Amino acid sequence: MSEAASALGNASFEGFATIREIGPMGMIALRAKHDLPQLSAALTAVLGLGLPERRRILTRGEVRVGWMSPDELLIVLPYGDVAATVAALTQALAGVHMLVADVSDARCIFRIEGEKAAQVLMKLCPVDFAMLAPDELRRTRTAQVPAAFWAEQGGYTLVAFRSVAAYVMGLLTHSAQPGSELFPG
Amino acid sequence: MSTRLARGGRLIDRATAHEFTFNGKRMAGFAGDTLASALLANDQMLVGRSFKYHRPRGIVASGAEEPNALVNLGQGARLEPNQRTTTTELFPGLAAASQNHWPSLEFDVGVVNNAVARFLPAGFYYKTFLQPRAAWKHLFEPVIRASAGLGRAPTEADPDRYEQAYAHCDLLVVGGGIAGLQAALTAAGTGARVIVLEQTAHWGGRAPVDDVLIDEKPADHWVAATVAALSAMPNVTLRLRCMAAGVYDHGYVLAEERVADHTPGDGRPKKRLWRIRAAKVITATGAIERPLPFAGNDIPGVMLASAVRDYIVNWAVSPGDRVVIVTNNDDAYRTAIAVHRAGLTVPAVLDARTEADGDLVQEVRSLGIAVHLNRGIAKVKGGRRVSGVAVCAQAGEGAVLDEIACDAVAMSGGWSPVVHLWSHCGGKLIWDEAQAAFRPDPQRPPITHDGQAMVAAVGSANGLLQADEVLADAIRAAGGSGPAPKVHAPAEAAMVPVWMMPQGASAELRAKMWLDYQNDVKVADVQLAAREGYESVEHTKRYTTLGMATDQGKLSNINGLAVLAGSLNAPIPQVGTTTFRPPYTPVTLGALAGEARGEIFQPLRRTPMHDWHQAHGVYWEPVGLWRRPYCYTRPGESHADAVKREVVNARSHLGLLDASTLGKIVVKGPDAGRFLDMMYTNVMSSLPVGRCRYGLMCNENGFLMDDGVVARISDDTWLCHTTSGGADRIHAHMEDWLQCEWWDWQVYTANLTEQYAQIAVVGPSARKLLEKLGGMDVSKEALPFMHWAEGTLAGIPARAFRISFSGELSYEIAVPAGQGLAFWEACIAAGKEFGLMPYGTEALHVLRAEKGFIMIGDETDGTVIPQDLNLGWAVSKKKADFIGKRGQERTFLASPDRWKLVGLETLDGSVLPDGAIAPAPGMNANGQRNTQGRVTSTYYSPTLKKGIAMGLVHRGPDRMGEVLEFPKIWGGVVKARIVDPVFYDKAGEKQDV
Amino acid sequence: MKRYSVFAIAREAMRHHTGWERAWASPLPKSSYDVIVVGAGGHGLATAYYLGKNHGITNVAVIEKGWLGGGNTGRNTTIIRSNYLQDSSAAIYEKARSLYEGLSQDLNYNVMFSPRGLLMLAQTHHEVRGYMRTVHANLLQGVETEWIGPEQVKRLVPIMNIDGPRYPVLGALLQKRGGTARHDAVAWGYARACSAMGMDIIQQCEVTGVRQQGGQVTGVETTKGFIGTKKLAIVVAGHSGQVAEMAGFRLPVEAVALQALVSEPIKPCIDVVVMANTVHGYMSQSDKGELVIGGGTDSFNNFTQRGSFHHIEETLRALIETFPIISRLKMLRQWGGIVDMTGDRSPILSKTPLGNCFINCGWGTGGFKAIPGSGWAMADLVAKGEPGPLAAEFGMDRFREGRFIDESVAAGVAH
Amino acid sequence: MLILECPYCGVKAEETELSPGHEAHLKRFGPGSSDEQFESYMFARKNPKGVHFERWRHTYGCGKWFLAARCTATLEVFGTYPAQTSEPPADIVAKIKARRPNWEGVK
């Protein structure tokens, strides 16, 4: 049995912020209308987390539930826990119209860390960082590809599609070049 | 001569000297100099040649409006043409060279154009070079091309980096003069998020040069204090060297920051393009002084009065010992005072007005400077630099009253507000009679998304030239109410517009009055355009090229417009202005491209096995943003050889294909079957669980857009495969119908394309390989053709689809992407004993063509329906509806007369050329050959050892055995017989073993 | 009309060019005409010109709401080519191109047609196959094109990076007799020639209504009053839908913004026109030295003549990748034009539901190159009341029948 | 460069995060419809110089289609609303009428 590999083998770069590809990370896409009465209970029972508000991400330990759209949630969890969680969710939501899919391998995930981490993303994403809530999950564009990110532990965690992992790493590396800070000092 | 003054220079640091070169000549300047000020300090008056007549050109202005002083900056890969010296900061080692001359700046052969200038009026090229016809292309045009063009392009790729950045604010203030700073201070005090941009390297704008006193102190003090206050506020961002280039809809502003222009090669990005979203924009962009049109006003040494003042005050550069001032307003008297204070001589102030007694005029008189009213310049004397002026009465026709020796002329025709940014997005202008200028019409601003004003102009940009009015205006526009700082400024009398000097100038003189210095447009040219009926201001501009040079008419537009209005006997506002287009000043293309170069030019999508392919002789083929192996070459092999080998091996032994790029979309829900029956032309709801079915998707027009195998995963779940690169499009297509048409249907989709690596195991030994990997039963009985099963292979969770796009025994195995490479390598290792070889897309194409399988994009091109491809069997007749059904019922699509799919077999065994077309007898009404068919796919078949092809032929299937002739583009004809498109294993026995 | 020539210039030079006549008259409208052409852009003026030249119809007014040539004729990237795939497209564009070759002499006005050659780069295998199909089609259509390899591309355009790395150049479709012309001059030359035939070009005259009686057009209401006409030709790219609505029918057309830009002028560095469709960019160098660059279109309805800037960024990325030396040059000016887009991206030259009212629209992003051919075919249609061979396939009814003239291989739109 | 607020996720998205999708509130004509109906559904799209109702997809965000009322002559936006509606909501119609008194309403 082989180990799952992340897209870039945990590549990293030290610039005015630190860029690290992390993973593999477990991710589950759960499509269901958020006003389904069973949904919140199922999340609580399986993950110990409730239903996030619009554009928010809830965290408990290594588990997160993020709001992706009015009928989609993203569950982030340890890679090894995915199969059991998919099964548990499927069971908890039996008989309900929903779709649960393991998307862990479809994604790549990066950490952008350091005091100036936001400046790396300000070069790539059309997002007003000052207006982001601390627990906001923002889906947007990173240069030419879709991505989603949220703030945690003094930096940002960014998720993109696996096939473009090297491109995203290239972008983050270019943007974090020493000396190219947007707001020096 | 121009030189450095011994004292003064508020922007230079005399302790830090910088060496630089101009045309190879070593020169010295100071930190804080612009290249222009440094050139003047070295007495380099002559800096270039004009576009058309190659006339000598000197520095006219001190800022972004400069039309003349453009240079090739830098060398080699860092060469940058048309760099404006007035906005280029001096740095050590700077190397500049003048442009548009041959062989040298001082002696330019092109100046012959000047000698024959009277034969080259505006638009002369429209009237000549007509005969003989070929002469334009071969003779005249090459000469014109070679003589145009200003600077040289670099010959090497750009070594510098660029980047972009986003910013958001409540208020963007453009311009860091006193108006902009005051507006920012006022707005920031209310808590608004404010960004202030200043295009130069210094705050304060003109006020410190113009002796303005604010709160009883020189403006410099107020500027420093205000900048300090703003810097301390967390809600304010200040950026120097950042030029707002354009204002776009919904508060989008592009700005170019010169990050490392003045520190080349230090590793920082050369430029950064800011993409700013502002709820509101204040333009505090100031005003630009207008030249006066008099004969010889283009001779080096004739400068804007404000520029003369700037060079003296900011950079301690004297433009000449004797400076004649010529003006129609009071402001130019400030220059007289500055020149006098610097210890230089003002032989005379020539004032075109008949009265002048404002505070400044009186001060000048009190300094003992001669002020002559109703006077103008008949003609400037000199060649490569000014030697004197001939004085005339402004009211007259140019009779010379006097001659004054001088080495510089400072001219002022009044001021025009910088309205570019206001106008970019639709802001309208009104004519200000008092200032003889267009200024923003506050009643007709550009509007933003909610219908509210998007831009407000303040200060000089709003037509206010007095410092006290400027500050009050800034406070008002920024939403403040408090009193403005107290400003001391002299009272100024009204200006009087002068559009020609003298007003009755002869044709001879008018042919020497420059409006557009760079493009060599003179008063006479505009008058000619008007006379010939090019009456619209846009016609005049385009006919004469007025305002179309690299300065975009910053100095010439209003003067040109006024001359046109005069020629048409129409009021200026009725003639109107040309449209202001972004950018305000030219923006580097590299900055606009941003980071997107080289490796990150575009996203390159990689499958999990990408690096393995790279390490094993791959020749890549771009497929959308993916890159797929076209073939794997071995040493000494051509691509064609490799493809042959791969095909033969897959047919005889075992091939392995990376099919990960195929789209994989899960569709689930109580209404999923019904939904897929709408998406596909055939029926998917009846597919049993565990089975696969080939499906076709059409667009609403009825044309085939995608195909792929659909597998039923469970009672309410289907997995739809799409073409490579089609996944996102098809997923979006599905979501579109679900969200916008059938939103009450219970269906969810998920695009799982990248979750899985997909590997096709193809060939007679396919089953043996999977059995060796072990973990699941892949026997014919357990996993029959067109079935799928889930299990484990080589210890990796896998889903195996028993499908074939090659006609061989074949499985497609989907494994989690993170284990895709491991699975691939397991196959490679285990397959050795079966003769396994990986194969690429070209072998895939050959294999499918031998079997007569169609390929989306080859057999289809957006105008082909399934019935054309003999795929009518996959188009349900029973279903009441599916996407495309109604479209296919239209007469042209339902006609029996369409071109249909056949096989084509050349009589001589050769390969038909790609895209070949078979003519039919006769010509159509347009004299084109009639046609009856075309090749859609054509290959050499290593299996059959001859060329095979598919094509669409008029009523093709009814014409089996007929021979068509295909002309070749390099001559000759290939004959091909119409045959069945299935060339190999017609019974389909090999895939079903 | 005084003829233009080098001798005329020499004569005028002696008297400071005071003797030049107006290039075209600016008359007030008469009460009625045989034909009114709405729109004094290239297509409208060419329609009028060939009505006179080919059909002897000179009692014609061309009315224009702004200034002549001020729409897309004056804001395009001036490319001329006829290397189209479909027969009907190739026919009308090749007619146009061949007329361009002699247009300066025909009009006695130098439109600076410059057959400097036009390259369409193939940067994927799929594109190679597509262009091979075009070359074969052109062979049978009588359009001179050829296929050249990457080395020849490099010889023609030394500043091009043909080795990728992302999209190596695999070859190109070359039309040697394609090129550029001076766009304003085309409008001005036609206007001058129309005026010389006695036609009225009426600028600053906006159509506000179309009058009809018994299903036949009788005239137009304008800001300069009512003008009667026996026949009406609507040739107003960008605002076709608005005028059609006045005439009582809806067009299968949407208006979108197309963008373009020029660089600062530099000494000649590229002699041919290059189009790179995989990366979406095209570029040529004008006689003034500016690089003339075409951007993309927005996909939403827009009448502002301002497009969305990100298309320009996309275009420049592509061109810098293809021509690395242009990175340090600067964008001098950018602008947008409003173009009509039809359901198959091909034009409409058609009779309309209103009798004696004809429409010419839908040229999308390709109108300039078609001007002489379009005017020729439209004049034919207006004069005879029925389309001739050039216009035959471009009728409005083709959408109902599904008889598209599709030059793209893109999948159609849903909804 | 437009900004449109996605009615589903509340993001004020800029144009580069969105994909335009042409006219809104189209009625689909399938099998059984006349040639004229099908042609009008597929091709005779509204192209007003003024108030327009159109479809957009929040492609780089929540992926949802939504509808927008926008002026094609000034690019003003009167409002956005979910795609699951068959006609413009009353509040948006009221807003348009307030700003465009001469607007003739949904034709």
Image (cartoon, rainbow, N blue to C red):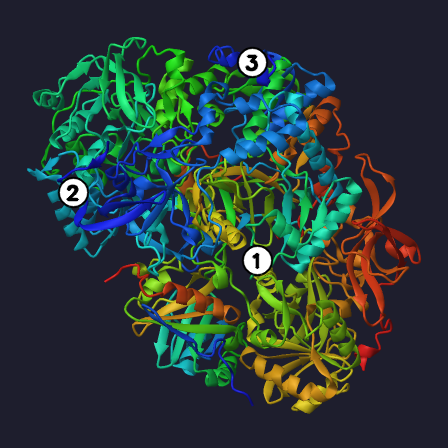
Residue type beneath disc 3: Pro
Q: How many marks?
A: 3
Mark 3 closeness class: few <14, some 14–19, many ≥20 residues within 10 Å = many
Residue C222 on image: x %, y %: 53, 20
The answer to which of C195 and B784 lies nearer the viewer is C195
Badge 2 element:
loop
Name the subunit of mark 3. C
Q: What residue is drawn where x is 17% and y is 30%?
A: B466
Residue B402 on image: x %, y %: 23, 12
Q: Quadrant of the C terminus of chain A?
A: bottom left
Q: CA distance from mark 1 to mark 2?
A: 63 Å
Residue B986 sits above or below residue C172 on the image: below
Q: What residue is drawn where x is 56% and y is 90%?
A: A1
The quadrant in which residue B794 appears is bottom right
**Closer to us: mark 1 or mark 2?**
2
The answer to which of C89 and B713 lies nearer the viewer is C89
The disc placed on residue B493 is: none
Badge 1 element:
helix
| Mark sitting earlier along the chain (1/2) | 2
The disc placed on residue B736 is: 1
The disc placed on residue B10 is: 2
**Residue lying farthest to the right in this orientation:** B961
Residues at circles 1 and 3 in contact by the CB criterion of under 8 Å: no
Q: What residue is drawn where x is 75% and y is 70%?
A: B641
